[in-house]
Image (cartoon, rainbow, N blue to C red):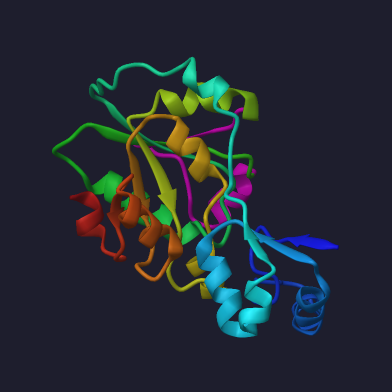
Amino acid sequence: YSVFLFDLYKDNFYPVFPAGFLAKIFEPKILKNAEKIIVTNEGTLNYYTQIYGEEIRKKIVVIHNSTFPEPYLKLHTNYNPKPPYTILYTGRISWPQIGSLKNLIKAVEELKDIDINLKIYCPNPKDYLKKIGIRESKKVKISIAPPQKMPEIQTQADILFLPLSWHTKSQKIIDTATPGKLADYLISNRPILIHAPSSTFLVKYAKENNFAVIVDEENIEKLKS
């Protein structure tokens, strides 16, 4: 068999026992017996190589997250942002994104010298969002839209926001993740703002390929700047 890992297995965050315990038992067995191990980035490849050695590395194949470009390409327009400017986040909000997204909300709400707002499109119930401290305000709007509408929504943004958080329940997941929405953001042909720890593969990859503005410190003032 081949195993396709969209995230780390053993070092993921499992809220219910005995999932994490079983992952520690089964991950070495699964990887050892797999013919191929498919991961989504070189950071995960290097991570598993450090743990399991060269024999495992030989079996790893990187298949990057991708998206169908046609719905996006036909919506491309010249970039000509005008106030009020919009920062956009699309997708689910859970423990990997919460802290970073709340930093952005604080930064946007503190900005007084520029007319800018944050739009969030996510399927999470608003009761859940309130529970984790994410609420609507004059500068923050929360909506929901079907996946088919995402190309239109993302290609109209002034800035696309890509967050990964600090002090999470699994730093190893944060350090090796490439969010699935990255491919959508790139094909949207709009500027990307990444707010994530400097230790993450996402930040290193963005710096190497120069496709985003990066704030890799948990610093509200730098995020505002």
Nearest the eye: 203 or 94: 203
User: Is residue 48 in view from this perspective?
Assistant: yes
User: What span is in magenta?
Assistant: 125-145
Nearest the eye: 102 or 21: 21
Above/below status of 14 relative to 53: above
Find residue 150 and report its horizontal and vertical position in percent.
55, 28
Q: Residue at x 21, y 44 (%)?
A: 111
Find residue 185 and report its horizontal and vertical position in percent.
46, 37
Above/below status of 188 relative to 162: above
Q: Residue at x 38, y 66 (%)?
A: 197
Q: Is 109 situated left or right of 175 in this image?
A: left
Q: Quadrant of the N terminus?
A: bottom right
Q: Is 110 situated left or right of 97 in this image?
A: left
Nearest the eye: 199 or 44: 44
Q: Is 105 situated left or right of 184 in this image?
A: left
User: Is residue 138 in view from this perspective?
Assistant: no
